[in-house]
Image (spheres, grey):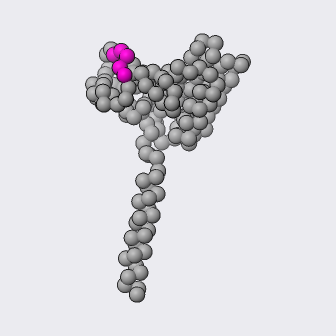
Amino acid sequence: MKKFFFPIAMLVMAALAYGQDSAQPPKDLSGFSGYAWGAGIEFVTNHMEGEDYDLISASCKDLWYRGKLLNEKLRLVYLFEDGMLTSGIWIFDDVDYESYWQVSEFLQNTYSTNVEMTVKGDDWIEAEMWPRGTNAQIVHNLDVEDDRHEVHYYYRSGEE
């Protein structure tokens, strides 16, 4: 009986461990919208062709795409220096509090990080995040008066 118990117990533990690992979010959340900092402009362009985003404009310094995130229409902007990804922006069409809080909740759940929030008046909010284990600074803005709702990702060298 003992001969059968140990292999079965090992199989059950392995299955449970596999189930837990496969349910975990990806560990590397660095970079912007699925691309690592330093990714080349050609690499991003080639891979975005296969995604469900429409190219709006392209130059040697930026790529602009149209798409959706969290059922919100947006423009994705990949910014490059010397041909390498160094920053990115999500620019949302919806400029309202409901949209802002939905995106804010998504960011907090994704990165499990504290948020440093600043509120000015009734129409301006800024939240900054420095997620541990990444090399990004994330700034989430809502400016109703200027008709702007965006999330800006910045590369922080030396962080990880």
Which residue does the image show at 59% across and 36% down from the upper left?
Answer: 105
Evaluate whether residue 63 shows in this view. no
Q: Quadrant of residue 87?
A: top left
Which residue does the image show at 40% across and 76% down from the upper left?
Answer: 8
Q: Main secondary structure of the magenta part?
A: strand
Q: Is residue 50 left or right of residue 89?
A: left
Of residue 7 and residue 31, the one placed in the foreground of this image is: 7
Which residue does the image show at 46% across and 52% down from the upper left?
Answer: 23
Of residue 114 and residue 121, the one placed in the foreground of this image is: 121
Image position of 22 with respect to 123: above or below: below
Image position of 112 with respect to 13: above or below: above
Q: Which residues are magenta?
A: 54-58
Residue 118 on image: x %, y %: 66, 25
Which residue does the image show at 59% across and 32% down from the upper left?
Answer: 102
Residue 127 on image: x %, y %: 60, 28
Image position of 92 with respect to 112: above or below: above
Residue 15 colored magenta?
no
